[in-house]
């Protein structure tokens, strides 16, 4: 069984240190499991050549709803390791998140992965708990939003069956979780799992949480990790 943790990032977030914070913390635990890999996915900046009118209008209408979070200060230089970053055909912005999601799944399918945990660079994962969570018994598992929708912030685990559907699906919304939920609805079983969480409900030694959406990654990534490992946090201050 081959499992990929497929992390969407962008140039801006790399400058702010989000992928570096993941690398410094939970990504290091992947080395214990030979069946696990990870990659960061960025847009190559090129036009997709697809009809984007529907989801671009939706994205523009929702821009004002996004709060302005503080950022890690000072910026942390992120220098990718060899084969750590994959460029996919899309502009490197959040308005193309769904296309970036589909295109990274196409890359994963081409490389023969059986399962993909798809998430962003503000996701924290307790690798040991993920491996023992029985995700391989499900096609579409993550945090419950509704009977037809899984929230993508804490990550969504997809089987090969789901991946094969998604890589051939048109993109009609800008959000990756919306794209997955729309495309998989009625085709695979949606399985909610309350161990996929939102900040401030994070993995700790005294709970069973697997992942969490930290929203502003930065120092939170180090703080959550130190709470699980008793390591000293080396985080930067947030505004």
Image: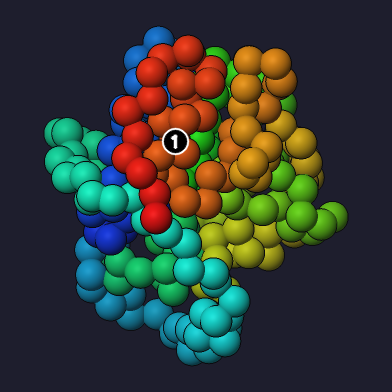
Image quarter of the C terminus: bottom left
143 vs 128: above or below: below
Front residue of this view, candidates 30 and 188 = 30
Front residue of this view, candidates 43 and 197 = 197
Residue 136: x percent and y percent? 65, 26
Classify residue 85 as left or right of residue 39: left
Residue 84: x percent and y percent? 24, 37
* Residue for point 32% across, 40% down: 236
- Furthest residue in direction right, as rendered: 147
Classify residue 51 as left or right of residue 236: right
Color scheme of the displayed model: rainbow
Residue 161: x percent and y percent? 62, 42
Residue 205 lies in what quarter of the image? Answer: top right
Residue 128: x percent and y percent? 54, 15
Residue behind mark 1: 221
Let me know if residue 4 appears in the view. Answer: no
* Residue for point 40% across, 39% down: 219
Instruction: For label 1, count other residues whose C-alpha is less than 10 Å away and answer few (under 14), some (14-19) or many (20+).
Output: many
Q: Exactly how many numbered labels are in the figure? A: 1
* Residue for point 33% across, 50% down: 72
140 vs 206: above or below: below
Residue 165 lies in what quarter of the image? Answer: bottom right
* Residue for point 42% across, 59% down: 70
Let me know if residue 223 appears in the view. Answer: yes
Classify residue 218 as left or right of residue 152: left
Helix, strand or loop at label 1? It is: helix
């Amino acid at each position: 069984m081959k499992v990929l943790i497929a992390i969407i990032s962008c140039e801006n977030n790399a400058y702010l240190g989000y992928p570096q914070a993941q690398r410094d913390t939970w990504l290091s635990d992947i080395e214990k499991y030979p069946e696990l890999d990870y990659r960061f996915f960025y847009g190559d900046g090129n036009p997709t050549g697809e009809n984007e009118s529907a989801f671009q209008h939706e994205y523009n209408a929702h821009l004002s709803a996004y709060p302005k979070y503080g950022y890690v200060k000072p910026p942390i230089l992120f220098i990718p390791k060899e084969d750590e970053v994959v460029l996919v055909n899309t502009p490197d912005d959040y308005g193309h998140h769904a296309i970036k999601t589909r295109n990274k799944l196409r890359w994963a399918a081409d490389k023969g992965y059986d399962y993909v945990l798809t998430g962003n660079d503000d996701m924290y994962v307790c690798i040991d708990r993920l491996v023992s969570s029985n995700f391989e018994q499900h096609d579409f598992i993550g945090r419950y939003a509704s009977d037809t929708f899984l929230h993508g912030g804490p990550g969504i685990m997809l089987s090969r069956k789901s991946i094969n559907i998604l890589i051939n699906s048109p993109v009609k919304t800008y959000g990756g979780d919306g794209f997955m939920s729309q495309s998989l609805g009625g085709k695979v079983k949606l399985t909610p799992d309350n161990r996929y969480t939102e900040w401030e409900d994070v993995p700790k030694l005294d709970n069973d949480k697997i992942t969490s959406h930290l929203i502003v990654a930065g120092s939170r990534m180090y703080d959550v990790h130190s709470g699980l490992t008793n390591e000293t946090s080396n985080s930067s201050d947030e505004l």
